[in-house]
Image (spheres, rainbow, N blue to C red):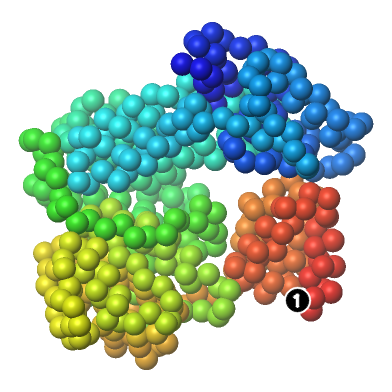
């Protein structure tokens, strides 16, 4: 069995099934930081900051020496020569990722998400097994800012996985079993609209339709009162379907059969800390979802959402159109269960991209075929499917647009004349000052930004409130705990920012 480590709950280590005493809390905090980056060098400076914060005045005398003492004691406790390695500038824990419950959990979730639409029964089994590895709050009792940030990140991922689990429950007709957990989840997360959507559907399928309708009205009032927003299109659409007694909402009588074998998901990872785009995301979601079903579309800057809507995002360099396009695609992914195609770069030849798209859809493109023939085969392959196409910075997007009922496209960074006349358009500009401040706080740390509100405002102004520039300079500041925000302002000024 060997050494095993648990971080999805109180930090624990076992050797051949026997518990190991990991010592005092600060010693455990050092081990936690090393376990979250197995096999990688963790700089001593990062360990010091993660344990005692960024304020040097709060550091103990000789903090690097104390880290060394903790590492020495951990070596003795773990009794595995060569496991905890001290190198110039930091420490490395030579442990197999499979020996840490976190990475087994992440592997299970990843495999489940891959199978989510092709084999939902197996996907649910894998996801339930992964979630069973949790034994409470991650790194419970481990002190320090590093552990706290890790706890927040892992809790957010756990919450997302739980939502996927319950979505699979509903897809498999397990609404009665899921409802008690969804009751508790909806009460604990009153603003999480995906949780509320799942809860409404479970209530309706359990014959509690009146409660589902009342819950939607309560959600709408709460969002309007607290955020000044209407419910997201996916929730509003479900409410409308419940009200009219849509027969398609009935629970499946048997496990959902596997989808087509070729269900590509080519999207880059979503950005977890996108800020300041809530209104645009909601409007874009409304437009894109109109392509996934029979709902009517709408206008944005003159655009008309038809059976295969095209949404163009434009803005100055650094405004984050690429990140917004990817975020939108992840937001509406459930409405396009047959796949998401992605292409980026102005130098990509339409013929090469079409051939790649065809292969991703399970087709075999004819060699030496022209763009016209490839386009015909591409749209034939899309017929009857619901696929979202995301094009980022593609010079000539027209041949790559799906133009098939049930599909939709998001196009970022294209020239206005390159889009169809009926395309919907959203302008993406700089962030509002308060949103720029929030972005800095998320990347650098709220406490660090809060200590220097004036210099933080100067950083945002020097970056023109553009999210790409803000994220770049914030990452530079986060990597330099010895800098103040004022130091960053001086650095930017010296470079003419």
Q: Nearer the viewer, residue 107 or 403?
A: 107
- Is residue 176 shown above or below 433? above
- Is residue 63 shown above or below 305? above
Residue drawn at x 84%, y 34% is 64
Does any portion of residue 131 appear in the rendered image? yes
Q: Quadrant location of the C terminus? A: bottom right
Image coordinates for residue 351, horizontal then vertical, percent: 27, 81
Q: Nearer the viewer, residue 184 or 215?
A: 184
Alpha-carbon neighbours of circle 1 within 10 Å: few (<14), some, or many (≥20)?
Answer: few
Does any portion of residue 302 appear in the rendered image? no
Count of numbered labels shown in the rendering? 1
The residue wearing badge 1 is 497
Outermost residue toward the top in this view: 18
- Is residue 235 shown above or below 38? below
Outermost residue toward the bottom in this view: 417
Outermost residue toward the right in this view: 61
Residue drawn at x 60%, y 32% is 94
Residue drawn at x 84%, y 42% is 55
Q: Nearer the viewer, residue 428 or 119?
A: 119
Residue drawn at x 71%, y 16% is 76
Q: Nearer the viewer, residue 493 or 33?
A: 33
Image coordinates for residue 118, horizontal then vertical, percent: 20, 46
The quadrant where residue 87 appears: top right
Image coordinates for residue 272, horizontal then vertical, percent: 51, 52
């Amino acid at each position: 069995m060997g050494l095993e480590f648990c971080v999805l709950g109180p930090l624990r280590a076992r050797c051949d099934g026997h518990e190991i005493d990991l010592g005092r809390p600060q010693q455990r905090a050092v081990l936690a930081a090393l376990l979250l980056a197995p096999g990688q060098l963790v700089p001593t400076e990062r360990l010091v900051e993660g344990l005692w914060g960024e304020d040097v005045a709060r550091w103990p005398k000789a903090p690097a020496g104390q880290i060394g003492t903790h590492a020495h004691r951990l070596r003795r406790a773990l009794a595995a020569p060569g496991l905890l390695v001290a190198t110039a500038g930091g420490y490395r824990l030579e442990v197999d990722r499979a020996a840490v419950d976190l990475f087994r959990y992440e592997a299970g979730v990843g495999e489940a998400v891959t199978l989510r639409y092709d084999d939902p029964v197996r996907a649910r089994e894998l996801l339930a097994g992964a979630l069973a590895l949790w034994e409470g709050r991650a790194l419970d009792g481990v002190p320090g800012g590093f552990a706290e940030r890790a706890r927040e990140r892992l809790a957010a991922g756990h919450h997302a996985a739980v939502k996927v689990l319950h979505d699979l429950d509903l897809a498999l007709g397990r609404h009665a079993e899921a409802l008690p957990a969804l009751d508790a989840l909806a009460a604990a997360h009153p603003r999480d609209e995906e949780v509320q959507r799942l809860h409404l559907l479970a209530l309706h399928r359990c014959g509690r339709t009146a409660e589902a309708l009342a819950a939607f009205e309560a959600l709408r009032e709460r969002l309007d009162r607290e955020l000044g927003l209407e419910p997201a299109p996916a929730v509003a659409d479900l409410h409308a379907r419940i009200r009219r007694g849509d027969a398609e909402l009935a629970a499946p009588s048997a496990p959902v059969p596997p989808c087509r074998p070729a269900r590509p998901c080519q999207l880059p990872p979503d950005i977890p800390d996108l800020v300041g785009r809530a209104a645009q995301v909601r409007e874009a979601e409304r437009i894109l979802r109109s392509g996934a079903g029979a709902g009517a579309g709408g206008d944005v800057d003159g655009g008309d959402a038809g059976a295969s809507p095209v949404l163009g995002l434009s803005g100055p360099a650094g405004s984050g159109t690429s990140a917004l396009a990817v975020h939108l695609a992840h937001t509406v992914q459930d409405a396009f269960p047959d796949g998401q195609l992605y292409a980026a770069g102005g130098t990509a030849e339409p013929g090469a991209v079409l051939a790649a798209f065809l292969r991703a859809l399970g087709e075999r493109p004819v060699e030496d075929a022209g763009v016209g023939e490839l386009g015909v085969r591409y749209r034939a392959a899309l017929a009857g499917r619901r696929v979202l196409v995301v094009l980022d910075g593609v010079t000539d997007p027209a041949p790559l647009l799906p133009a098939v009922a049930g599909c939709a496209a998001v196009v970022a960074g294209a020239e206005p004349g390159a889009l169809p006349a009926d395309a919907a358009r959203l302008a993406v500009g700089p962030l509002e000052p308060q949103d720029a401040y929030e972005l800095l706080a998320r990347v650098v740390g709220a406490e660090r930004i809060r200590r220097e509100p004036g210099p933080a405002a100067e950083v945002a102004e020097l970056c023109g409130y553009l999210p790409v520039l803000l994220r770049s300079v914030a990452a530079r500041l986060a990597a330099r705990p010895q800098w103040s925000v004022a130091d960053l302002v001086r650095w930017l000024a010296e470079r003419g920012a």
